[in-house]
Image (cartoon, helix red, strand yellow):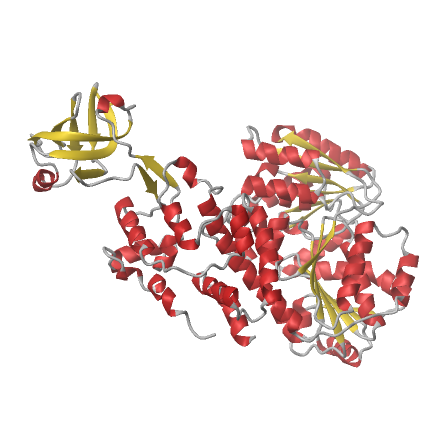
């Protein structure tokens, strides 16, 4: 796989090779993330202007865009400085004025010479009952044509619509005829045009309808992007699967002991996931699986069963959590079950120092520790396993594809199971985890009480505090989550600290605790620990607590300014209560009046506890980037594809990408060669690297 194919060179030259673009305007294009002619042709119009000519300005609705043929009359230069330059023009029925507030008299004379016919187009308005057109967008001599519908492109300060349109037209001329990479049956079924034809159609809309994501041209181009992305993930998956794994098969004796010790039977979804994972581990190739479950769907039990399979096969398992407090919580939850099975479980975090740490490392290297729970400290150089078979990653902080690959390098043959508590809509799960197999926990285990959710205006603070008093008197605990006021940490801090002070005044010393993002980790852990042990009754927090904390005695969740949070986040926060036998409540405090989206969010939460339904709604309301938190999600930036509206295309792209590789793993056949061109075109460097190694 040598460098970029020659026929794509013209699309990847510098922008300055296009007519009319110099170094200065190239910098402006860079603000739109446009660096090459290829980027330009994939920047589609976002709107359009109707430039259909009318005989007279009288036939148009003013104010509005008018395109009209005129005879140029006299020029009226300004009498004093700072006044506008006026030119009288006459159309088929009436006369009106073209007005310029800048530019030289020479320029205006040349553009609109008296006595000549011109076609002018621009926004016209009535001024003191007389029609006028300030600064026309277009002035054309007879015989020059204007498209009846002019596409409008995204612009940036200093970049004019004319520069953009000219650059796009020049870039389109460079698009070569390329072989078809889309499956011919799919192409025929959808009625999609070829790549070059689709680009032409998308850049030359004939009306507003041609701007919708549903047009065949735009669908095809969106599919090209999604298909290139899914090819990359499919190649990553194929590379993973080609790497030698180890068949890990247990006899089930440890797992039977744990199931016998459980107070209730696993749900159908848990049983199905346990079987899928065991079947994967038994294969001689590496497992790379995502276990997706809603808050409280019982992922931990499924993970433990997988870890026990590794131990039954004579190996070791590791479970990794993003924070110390979660690692401790996992260890505390798993230890009684590990004890019931007679398995040695240890925890390793950054806190382990000196002799104690060394003793753990030695036991690990000997194979005496069978299951290790820890933070990313387990990835340090000196941590050696005797026989690591399975790594479970509790993926609260979005372990990206890159980190998952690093993990594989630690122990090339070890199976990987990633757990996530964020129910992600299927289309996004495919974007984010398309290189993995998917197990979904979509049932709640027995023994969890439903949570009553109510929305309360901020004005009723007194009632909320009274309700807390009553609950605390009954021996229960509560969370009080403060809003992230804005991006600045200091503002969050003041909101959390002020609330902490006012609640401390209401409930007395020692009853209220505080955790926020600015605290040193040890202090945060200590404050959390006091709450877990039941010493403090109310925990005031910024959103640090959405991640996995388990306090069965906490039965009230107050979320202040709930309208400022995303749906998925609110759902995660609510999932912190309802973990014990007590009836639980989640109070969404909001500041009226509510905007439409905020109101929809709070309504969906009141209606549903199903994280998957909530995440689909969230995607509809907020868009893909926000649902995953684009900043850290590593979501690709698609120029054309719209994940909210084109979710179905993503699934098709995944199926097709996997099929292509199954039929032609080295992309050596004719379609394979076309797909390689697509990967070069869409700059899927990772895929190209994987191919050149393959």
Give the quarter of the image for residue 330.
bottom right
Q: Residue furthest top?
A: 129
Between 461 and 553, which is closer to the camera in this rendering?
A: 553
- Let me know if residue 500 appears in the view: no
Return the x and y of residue 650 as percentages of the image width and height: 57, 51
Q: Residue at x 41, y 70 (%)?
A: 4
Q: Is residue 692 visible in the rendered structure shown here?
A: yes
Q: Looking at the image, which residue is at 45% across and 40% down?
A: 212
| Quarter location, residue 591 | top right
78 shown above or below 260: above
Front residue of 421/71: it is 71
The percent coordinates of residue 172 (x first, y second) are 33, 54
> Which part of the image, by quadrant, shows the C terminus?
bottom right
- The residue nearer to you, when weighing 681 against 220, is 220
Residue 666: image location, x then y, percent: 56, 71
Is 372 placed above or below 115 here? below
> Is 589 placed left or right of 37 in the picture?
right
Q: Is residue 5 left or right of residue 106?
A: right
* Res 6 → quadrant: bottom left
Q: Is residue 575 above or below residue 207?
A: below
């Amino acid at each position: 796989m040598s460098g970029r194919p020659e026929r794509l060179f013209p699309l990847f030259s510098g922008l300055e090779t296009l007519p009319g673009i110099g170094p200065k305007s190239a910098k402006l294009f860079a603000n739109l993330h446009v660096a090459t002619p290829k980027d330009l042709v994939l920047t589609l119009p976002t709107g359009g202007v109707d430039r259909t000519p009318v005989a007279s300005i009288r036939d148009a609705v003013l104010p509005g865009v008018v395109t009209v043929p005129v005879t140029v009359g006299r020029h009226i230069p300004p009498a004093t400085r700072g006044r506008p330059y006026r030119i009288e023009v006459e159309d088929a029925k009436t006369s009106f004025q073209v007005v310029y507030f800048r530019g030289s008299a020479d320029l205006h004379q040349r553009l609109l010479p008296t006595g000549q016919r011109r076609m002018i187009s621009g926004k016209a308005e009535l001024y003191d009952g007389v029609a006028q057109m300030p600064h026309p967008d277009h002035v054309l001599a007879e015989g020059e044509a204007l498209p009846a519908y002019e596409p409008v492109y995204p612009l940036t300060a200093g970049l004019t619509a004319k520069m953009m349109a000219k650059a796009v037209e020049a870039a389109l001329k460079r698009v070569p005829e390329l072989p078809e990479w889309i499956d011919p049956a799919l192409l025929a079924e959808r009625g999609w045009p070829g790549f070059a034809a689709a680009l032409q159609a998308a850049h030359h809309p004939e009306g507003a309808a041609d701007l919708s994501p549903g047009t065949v041209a735009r669908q095809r181009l969106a599919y090209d992007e999604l298909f290139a992305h899914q090819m990359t993930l499919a190649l990553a998956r194929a590379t993973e699967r080609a790497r030698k794994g180890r068949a890990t098969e247990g006899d089930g004796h440890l797992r039977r002991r744990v199931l016998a010790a459980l107070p209730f039977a696993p749900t159908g979804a848990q049983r199905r996931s346990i079987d899928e994972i065991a079947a994967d581990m038994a294969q001689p190739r590496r497992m790379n699986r995502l276990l997706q479950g809603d808050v409280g769907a019982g992922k931990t039990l499924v993970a433990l069963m997988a870890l026990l399979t590794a131990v039954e096969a004579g190996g070791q398992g590791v479970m990794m959590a993003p924070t110390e407090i979660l690692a401790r919580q996992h260890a505390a939850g798993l230890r009684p079950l590990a004890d019931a099975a007679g398995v040695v479980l240890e925890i390793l975090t950054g806190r382990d120092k000196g002799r104690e740490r060394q003793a753990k490392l030695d036991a690990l290297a000997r194979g005496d520790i069978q299951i290790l729970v820890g933070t990313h400290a387990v990835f340090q150089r000196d941590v050696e396993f005797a026989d690591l078979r399975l790594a479970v990653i509790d993926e609260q902080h979005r372990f990206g594809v890159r980190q998952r690959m690093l993990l594989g390098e630690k122990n090339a043959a070890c199976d990987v199971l990633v757990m996530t508590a964020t129910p992600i809509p299927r289309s996004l799960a495919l974007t984010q985890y398309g290189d993995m197999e998917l197990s979904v926990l979509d049932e709640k285990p027995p023994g969890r009480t439903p949570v009553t959710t109510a929305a309360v205006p901020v004005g009723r603070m007194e009632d909320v505090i009274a309700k807390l008093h009553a609950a605390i008197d009954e021996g229960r605990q509560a969370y009080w989550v403060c809003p992230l006021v804005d991006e600045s940490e200091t503002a969050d801090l003041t909101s959390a600290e002020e609330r902490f002070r006012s609640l401390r005044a209401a409930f007395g010393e020692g009853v209220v605790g505080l955790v926020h993002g600015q605290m040193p980790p040890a202090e945060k852990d200590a404050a959390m620990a006091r709450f877990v042990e039941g010493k403090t009754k109310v925990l005031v927090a910024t959103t640090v607590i959405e991640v996995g904390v388990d306090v069965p005695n906490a039965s009230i969740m107050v979320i202040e300014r709930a309208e400022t949070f995303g749906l998925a986040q609110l759902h995660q926060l609510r999932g912190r209560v309802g973990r014990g036998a007590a009836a639980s409540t989640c109070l969404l405090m909001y500041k009226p009046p509510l905007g439409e989206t905020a109101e929809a969010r709070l309504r969906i939460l009141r209606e549903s506890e199903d994280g998957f339904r909530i995440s689909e709604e969230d995607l509809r309301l907020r868009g893909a980037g926000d649902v995953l938190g684009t900043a850290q999600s590593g979501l690709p930036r698609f120029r054309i594809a719209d994940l909210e509206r084109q979710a179905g295309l993503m699934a098709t792209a995944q199926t097709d990408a996997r099929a292509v590789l199954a039929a032609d793993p080295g992309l050596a056949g004719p379609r394979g060669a076309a797909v390689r061109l697509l990967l070069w075109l869409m700059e899927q460097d990772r895929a190209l690297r994987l191919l050149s190694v393959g």
